[in-house]
Every structure is written in structure tokens, then in C-alpha cells.
Amino acid sequence: MKFCIFSSGSKQNCFYLESGKTALLIDMGISFRALNVMLRALGREVSDLGGVFISHEHSDHTRGLATLTKRTALPIYLHPASKARLGLPLTHARLLYPHIPVTLGDITILPFPVSHDAVNTFGFRITDGDRSLFLASDLGCFDEAITTRTIGSHAIAIESNYDQLALHTCGYPPSLKARIRGRSGHLSNDDAVRFLQQTIQPHTLTVFLLHLSANSNSPSHVQQQIDTHLAIQFPHVTFHISHRDQALPLIEI
């Protein structure tokens, strides 16, 4: 299985997966034009995709969905509450429910609920029968029900949204800061470290840090956390930090 982060941050999110003859997207927060550019950089086309899975309805995960559905007949997999909130004429919608896996070609996707302030938010456990990926881009907190979803994962992609000090000193109003720090908001860099310290196992070879805020985080903040708390403890793991405005390479999990 191969994974590519097309974009991940507080303004747009889109993830690409492929295995065998199956290719799909998780979220469509980029423009249709950007999607075409990024797929072609991999030697792929939109016509190669088998479907799009939507984690939740927030615009940074769905901004390009209206155009995609106008220009293609791709099936869109999402929770019924997300479909209702989006209000789009999703002719090719396929409904997703918690803990009920969906198999698309060579890939099986298991959605599970996470705490975030949308009408419904999913994380995903994804496998092709050989390799597996845990992906949760937006969650305000985690517990054993979430961490157990990582068991057996060869790769973990987890939110690392904000630096505590940077959030405290940035220009956000107090209400937004409280929302971000809340249990239905986002994970801090410190939270992401704690999550990974609990979930990385000997067979976990790759970690992706996602959804960095443009205003209260930076790649250097996240890299410092990796260097200080994770790299020495887990020397067998390769760590990747997502970008808001450029894709990471296509990575074999």
C-alpha cells in the first residue's frame, strides 16, 4: 500500500492511497485543479480513483467536493449527518457508518468515531490485507477506544495541530483558542507525542504528523518534538511532517 499527503493543514486536507489496482482519496479539501496536478505528478489521473471517503463536513476537508461531483461520477463515502450538513446534490453518495468496514477493490476502510466539533467525524483504519494505516486528522482528545485502533498498524497518521505557546500568543480570540484546546477541538504537538508514545510498536515503521495550523504551529516546532521525544525512543520509525501547500512523496507503507 502506498500513501501520499497531497495537503494537510488548517485550510485544506486531502490524502491519496493506492494498492494493487485500487486508488482512492480521503477528504477533498483541495481544488479540482490542484487534485489533477498532484495526481499527474504521480503519473495518475482522476479516472484512476475508485472513490472518496470524507472524514467530516468542515470546509478544509470538503472544499473541492462540489466541483469533483459535478465533473466526475466518483462515489463519495460519508456519514449521513455529514451528507445532510453539506447540502450538496451527492448523486453518487455511499453512506458510511461507525465500525462498519467498506471494501473498495484491494483496500478495506474501517471508519470509527472521534471527538471533534463536526456533526460527525471519522478516523480511519485502512488495510490492503498486507499493510495497514491508522489515519486521524482531526480529534480533540483520545482514549483507549482510539489508541486500540492503531494495533497492528504499519503506519500512523495523526494530527499535530498546534504548539501550546504559539496558540497562547497568537492573535486568535479567546473563544477560538478555547475551542482549539477543547476535547472536541484539536491535538497539540504535546498530545501527538503522547499518542505516539502509547501507540508506536516494533512493526510501526512510518509516522505522519498532520494538520499543522498556519497560525499556531510550524514544521520546526513539530520537528523539535520529534527530535526531543520520539526519534531516540523509536529509532526504527521514519517521521514525516505534512505541508499545507505541497504534497509529500508517495510513500510505501
Image (cartoon, rainbow, N blue to C red):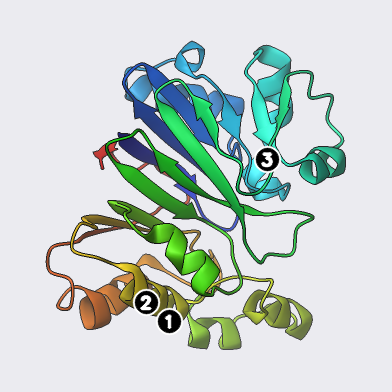
The tag on residue 62 is: 3
Of residues 133 and 26, which is closer to you in this image? Answer: 133
**Residue at the far front in the pictured view:** 100
| Whether residue 76 is situated above or below residue 15 in the rendered picture | above
Residue for point 36% across, 56% down: 156
Amino acid at circle 3: Thr
Identify residue for label 2. Answer: 193
| Whether residue 113 is situated above or below residue 246 in the rendered picture | below
User: SS for tag 1?
Assistant: helix
Precedes in sequence: disc 3 or disc 1: 3
- Residue 12 x, y percent position in the rendering: 58, 47
Determine the CA span between mark 3 and mark 1: 27 Å
Of residues 30 and 140, which is closer to you in this image? Answer: 140
Determine the CA span between mark 2 and mark 1: 5 Å
Q: Quadrant of residue 182?
A: bottom right
The tag on residue 86 is: none
Q: Tell me whether circle 2 and circle 1 mark residues in contact (CB < 8 Å).
A: yes
Identify residue for label 1. Answer: 190
Amino acid at circle 1: Asp
Asked if one can make out residue 159 in the rendered structure from this viewpoint, the answer is no
- Residue 49 x, y percent position in the rendering: 49, 19
Local packing at callout 3 (Cα closer than 10 Å; few below 14, some 14-19, many 20+) is: many
Precedes in sequence: disc 3 or disc 2: 3
Amino acid at circle 2: Val
Residue for point 39% across, 54% down: 242
- Residue 13 x, y percent position in the rendering: 55, 46
Local packing at callout 1 (Cα closer than 10 Å; few below 14, some 14-19, many 20+) is: some
Q: Tell me whether circle 3 and circle 2 mark residues in contact (CB < 8 Å).
A: no
Determine the CA span between mark 3 and mark 2: 28 Å
